[in-house]
Amino acid sequence: MRMVDLIEKKKHGLELNEEEIHDIIQGYVADKIPDYQMSAFMMAIYFQGMTEKETAILTNEMMHSGDTMDLSAIQGIKVDKHSTGGVGDKTSLAVGPMVAACGAPVAKMSGRGLGHTGGTLDKLESIPGLSVYLSEEDFIKQVNEIKLAIIGQTKKLDPADAKMYALRDVTGTVDSIPLIASSIMSKKLAAGADAILLDVKYGDGAFMKNVEDARKLAKTMIAIGDHLGRDTRATISNMNQPLGNAIGNSLEVKEAIATLKGEGPRDFTELCFEAGETMLLMTKMAATREEAHQKLEAVIQDGSALAVLAKMVEAQGGDASYIMHPEKFPKTKEVITVTSLESGYIEDLEALNLGLVSMKLGGGRAKMDDQIDHAVGLVLKKKVGDHVEAGEPLLDVHTNTGLSEELKADILSAYHIVDHEVAIPQLIEEILE
């Protein structure tokens, strides 16, 4: 069937079969289907959606559009974790070592940050010498030996997604749940893990702006995992304010290290434990949440979780002394404190605005080839529910370029202060299995 006929079929809301979806993905990757026809096809999906079966087939075809990782040589049930992105989200840097220290193999492929959300790879690269690229053989060897590796995706993995994502970005088809779900899951499935935990975020600092859309996306991805034989579960969490206190690459690494010492922020620690418990259940390293929680507590208290992070850094060529002595991370020329203009309780804290401020300081990318300053960022002193007096610090700005009045105004506008007490928001909405 001609591509135009398949576009027409989807435009009218009809279900495509496996052969038709196969021909579309293979044809597009081989440059036999032009961008303008693929754009029309994805716009048809945007308006008509896809059935669970169609979305699973699409994901499978994207996953097999290039190389796939064979992790069968890794002992045990391999688990991967994916976050849909948020401000201050350094969860993988803490929960990966925690779960690995409990004996579960964590084989993780991560991405880079773009816009207001930070990427795990960028955070890791703030550690001198660390390489986020390993051969498949070295990746497998490392996970077998120390139970943890966090690496970047190779260009040969899931090339269909790379082409489709770039096209979605310029054709107004980014926010389509079947396309988002197939994009995320095709990469995760191609990376070869047996079990996948998804942290689907909603709110101001997240891609999904409300909990209903986050739940729909999570259920779509779980259904894909079920169709393709992978244990897939999801945590739905609130990103209406930054996660933890640190925003910015090396600042977030230091906060993850503090958390592995039992000294992390309350909300970030809570999310790490919830995610870690689920991952231990998925890998059969614990039978109940209570048992999983106790194991995670133990590896923090005895220092073995922190030791695993240091071993991973060393195995990937990084200077592990930075993990044991985080004061070695380079400091910025200035640390500027922004103080409150009024007294009251913080009712709202716009994660998106603060993420953009960190990006503009040099801590993120407006486009993929931008260079990152790993040292810059923000450290929050006050969050939602906290009381603040006029003149009291709201946050510290770590900067090598000063702080313009415009950025200072952006920071102050992110804080919404009222004259009555405010409840601390619930971080984790639900866990879906």
Image: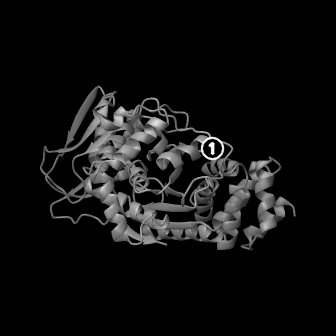
Percent across and percent down for residue 226 are 61, 71
Percent across and percent down for residue 355 are 38, 46
Q: Is residue 317 above or below residue 45?
A: above
Out of 185 and 190, give the one closest to the viewer.
Answer: 190
Identify the residue at image location x=67%, y=67%: 56
Q: In this view, does 266 lie above or below 423?
A: above
Identify the residue at image location x=73%, y=52%: 65
- Residue 404 appears in the figure: no
**Identity, as a three-letter code, of the amino acid under mark 1:** Glu
Q: With 365 as the anchor, is 240 left or right in this view?
A: left
Q: Residue lying at the far top in this picture: please name it.
A: 333
Out of 379 and 10, give the one closest to the viewer.
Answer: 379
Q: Is residue 277 above or below residue 393?
A: below
Q: Residue lying at the far right in this picture: please name it.
A: 1
Identify the residue at image location x=28%, y=33%: 327
Residue topped by disc 1: 136
